[in-house]
Image: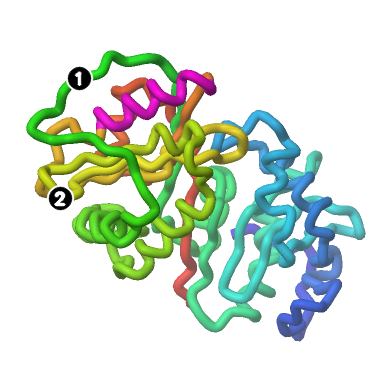
Amino acid sequence: MRMAHPSEAKIVPYLDYDRNAQTYPLTDAFKLVKAPSEKFAQYWAIYRNINEDFTLDYAVQANEIADVPFCYWIQQNNQTIGGSILLPNNLGDMFLVPPFSDWDTALGAVLPLLHHWSDKPIQAQQITHPQMEALVRHGFRVTSSRRWMIRPTQTYSDRSIAPYTVASISKDQTDTLAKLFYDAFSQSDDVSYRDRPLEQHQDSVENYFDQLTEGDRCYEASKSVYDDDKLIATVLVQMHNDMPSIRFAVTHPAYQRKGLGKHLIEQAIHTLAADFTAVKLAVTDGNPAQAIYYHMGFMPGDPIYSLVHDGD
């Protein structure tokens, strides 16, 4: 571990967390300064130096966090050298501003204050690869990684998947879709979904329909598969930063490896081709579906990590 320079002696005692506080001394040289959310988002979109969801417009990308109130500049000798979203027990969306590039020094200044604030394991989210490596050196461990994948749209010929039938989606199917999610994800290797209760899946489906415009191209591209009257698979599409995204591709465990999900994704790509040139989706690394998406022509982007620090 890098030894602190005498000019970087830590501040004792650290200040307790106060969401209204404007400044937190860290060392003789470093401090946190509350950042205006919109200005922070502009810096974040550029200096995070990753375009994980293939958003081509920096302004659109910045809108993702423009309303987050827990943004801080990391300053050294009153100069901004980075930024992060920080809360007790939480850290995320960090970036450094050139020419400063020393993650270990920046984290060595920030983390002691965050440990002082925290009374539970610290969750680090939306972490890029260089940050991940530095956080591991500071005692964090990786819990999961996700990445976006993208491919061009194209047309496909329709084909039968008899004896199953394909039907449009409807908001009155919310409970049925949530039950499909629960049955599928409860047997998944993806820990971020596996332990979710049925109610959380209901919230996800309701949120999806709340953001969907009935009759638009994403609605048209979203379909379900039935075995007689039983819902067995679905693909749900919505817009994300001006590009269509396959938000959910779910197949009941008893009907997996029959090509149902692949068929629905191909038909979604076909439908979207009328208005869009590309489609994307997000997947957890290690999910078996990741290989299927790759063989369907989806190009993987850079991973985004989640980590945890369990304490001393």
State the image coordinates of residue 195 (x, y, percent, origin top left).
29, 66
Location of residue 173 in the rendering, given as x and y in whole percent from the top left corner = 31, 55
- Alpha-carbon span between mark 2 and mark 1: 21 Å
The answer to which image quadrant residue 281 occupies is: top left
Q: What residue sits 24% from the left and 55% below the top?
A: 180
Q: In this view, does 202 lie above or below 234?
A: below
Residue at (45% x, 25% y) in the render: 272
Tag 2–tag 1 contact (CB < 8 Å): no
Amino acid under label 2? Lys
| Image location (x, y in percent) of residue 25 | 82, 73
Q: Nearer the viewer, residue 226 or 46?
A: 226
Q: Give the range drawn in magenta.
A: 262-276
Relative to 53, is 103 on the left or the right?
right
- Image vertical order of residue 219 relative to residue 77, above or below: above
Q: Which of 308 and 109 is in front in this view?
A: 308
Looking at the image, which residue is at 69% across and 74% down?
Answer: 113
Image coordinates for residue 214, horizontal then vertical, percent: 48, 43
**In which quadrant is the N terminus drawn?**
bottom right
User: Left of 46 or right of it: where is 219?
Assistant: left
Q: Which quadrant of the figure has residue 115?
A: bottom right
What residue is shown with label 1? 159
Label the magenta part by its dominant secondary structure: helix
Q: Which residue is the site of mark 2? A: 230
Which residue is at 67% across, 41% downward?
A: 61
Circle 2 — which element? strand
Horizontal placement of 253 versus 96: left or right? left
- The numbered disc on residue 65 is none
